[in-house]
Image (spheres, rainbow, N blue to C red):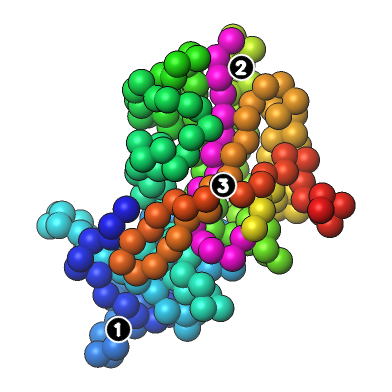
């Protein structure tokens, strides 16, 4: 996925009110930009870090610039969660994500219950698969972790996927890891133990869990490879 050509680099001053960040540009100008990430951004919101921002064509926006990525310890990390589904769909269409076999159709934003949607419905040669996508920006000691904040919505999605699996459909969660320094992925039990327990419960009831790592650079973000996911959590015993 190519990023907009109208991007600029700067330095993060602070991220605040969840959806705002102040960025210092090289010319000394300070911009308040939209931060499209509802999580805590733990480990990827350090003041003084290099960032990349893009400008929107929407003239009605109060904050025309958007935070795309941040660099921590020399690693670019994609934090724009609004791009995650596009990344995954591109990888599905290009065959990079091939866990579901040949795809006949991909339908986004599928309503599965009152007031709730899942990201994709895939029609495959072997039937229908419901797929929920999660953006993962947190990694510690080479392990990508989700979530980076308590997510009741994420837990609700898992329960809905379990019901779909019980109804005979395929059901899966895909973690899109927008950083290059993670070799494996697991639920963040220390941050949200309820979500972590529900992942293990859902895995025992037919929900599949996948993790794919993306290559992140200022020009483009591209899903490159699958990495192991540990539904019961990760420790050195997994080696």
The residue positioned farthest toward the top in the image shown = 167
Q: Nearer the viewer, residue 4 or 227?
A: 227
Q: Are marks 2 and 3 in contact (CB under 8 Å)?
A: no
- Give the mark, 1 or 2, whose residue is nearer the N terminus: 1
Is residue 109 placed above or below 50 in the rendered structure? above
SS class, disc 2:
helix
In this picture, residue 38 sits left or right of residue 36: right
Q: Is residue 87 above or below residue 12?
A: above
Give residue 117's quadrant in the image: top left
Q: Tag on residue 3? A: none
Give above or below for 198 relative to 56. above
Q: Which residue is mark 2?
A: 165
| Total marks placed | 3
Residue of label 1: 25
The magenta segment: 168-182
Residue picked out by circle 3: 226
The percent coordinates of residue 110 (x first, y second) are 39, 23
């Amino acid at each position: 996925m190519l990023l907009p050509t109208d991007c600029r680099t700067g330095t993060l001053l602070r991220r605040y009110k969840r959806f705002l960040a102040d960025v210092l540009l090289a010319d000394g100008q300070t911009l308040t930009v939209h931060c499209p990430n509802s999580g805590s951004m733990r480990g990827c919101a350090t003041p003084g870090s290099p960032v990349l921002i893009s400008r929107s064509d929407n003239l009605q926006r109060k904050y025309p610039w958007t935070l795309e990525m941040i660099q921590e310890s020399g690693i670019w990390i994609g934090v724009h969660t609004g791009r995650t589904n596009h990344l995954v769909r591109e990888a599905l269409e290009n065959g990079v994500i091939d866990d579901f076999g040949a795809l006949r159709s991909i339908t986004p934003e599928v309503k599965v219950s009152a007031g709730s949607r899942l990201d994709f419905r895939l029609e495959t040669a072997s039937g229908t698969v419901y797929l929920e996508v999660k953006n993962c920006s947190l990694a510690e000691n080479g392990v990508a972790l989700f979530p980076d904040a308590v997510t009741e919505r994420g837990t609700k999605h898992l329960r809905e996927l379990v019901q779909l699996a019980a109804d005979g459909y395929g059901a899966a969660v895909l973690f899109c890891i927008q950083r290059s320094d993670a070799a494996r992925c697991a639920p963040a039990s220390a941050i949200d133990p309820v979500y972590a327990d529900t992942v293990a419960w859902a895995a025992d009831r037919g929900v599949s869990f996948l993790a794919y790592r993306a290559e992140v650079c200022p020009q483009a973000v591209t899903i490159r490879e699958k990495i192991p996911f540990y539904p019961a959590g990760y420790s050195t015993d997994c080696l």
